[in-house]
Amino acid sequence: MRDRTLAMSASLLLTVAHLRRPWERTRGDHTLSSGSDRDELARIYRNEQNRDHRERTYERNRRLYL
C-alpha cells in the first residue's frame, strides 16, 4: 500500500511539475502540446515579433528625423 501511495505521489508531482503559468513560458519551449498551449505560445511569439518591429521602426524614424 505504501509503494502504491508513493508511486501515485510521484506521478502527481511529475504532472504538476509540467504545469506552468503562461507568463513563465518562452518562445523556445516546444514541449507543450495541447491546443491552448500552442495558442498561448503563438500569442507570445506574435507579441515578441511586434515588439521587435516597433523597436526597428523607432530606430529607423529616429535616424531619419533627428
Image (tube, rainbow, N blue to C red):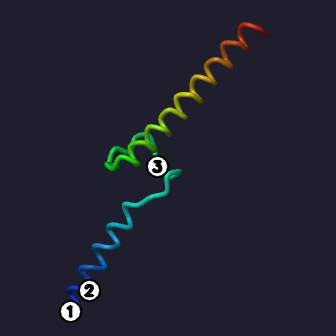
Residue 41 vertical position relative to residue 15 in the rendered view, above or below = above
> Residue beneath label 3, please?
25
Mark 3 / mark 2, whichever is N-terminal: 2
* Front one among 64 and 1: 1
Residue drawn where x is 26% and y is 86% of the image: 5
Mark 1 / mark 3, whichever is N-terminal: 1
- Tell me the crowding category of disc 3: few under 14, some 14 to 19, or many 20 or more residues within 10 angstroms, Cα based: some
Mark 1 and mark 2 in contact (Cβ < 8 Å)?
yes
Type of amino acid under label 3: Arg
Residue 11 vertical position relative to residue 28 in the rendered view, above or below = below
Type of amino acid under label 1: Met
Residue drawn where x is 32% and y is 73% of the image: 12
> Residue beneath label 2, please?
5
| Residue 48 point in image, percent of width and height | 53, 33
Type of amino acid under label 2: Thr
Distance between the Cα atoms at labels 2 and 1? 6 Å
| Residue 54 point in image, percent of width and height | 63, 24
Q: Is residue 65 left or right of residue 10?
A: right
Residue 19 sits in which quadrant? Answer: bottom left
* Front one among 43 and 61: 43
Q: Secondary structure at mark 2?
A: helix
Q: Secondary structure at mark 1?
A: loop
> Residue beneath label 1, please?
1
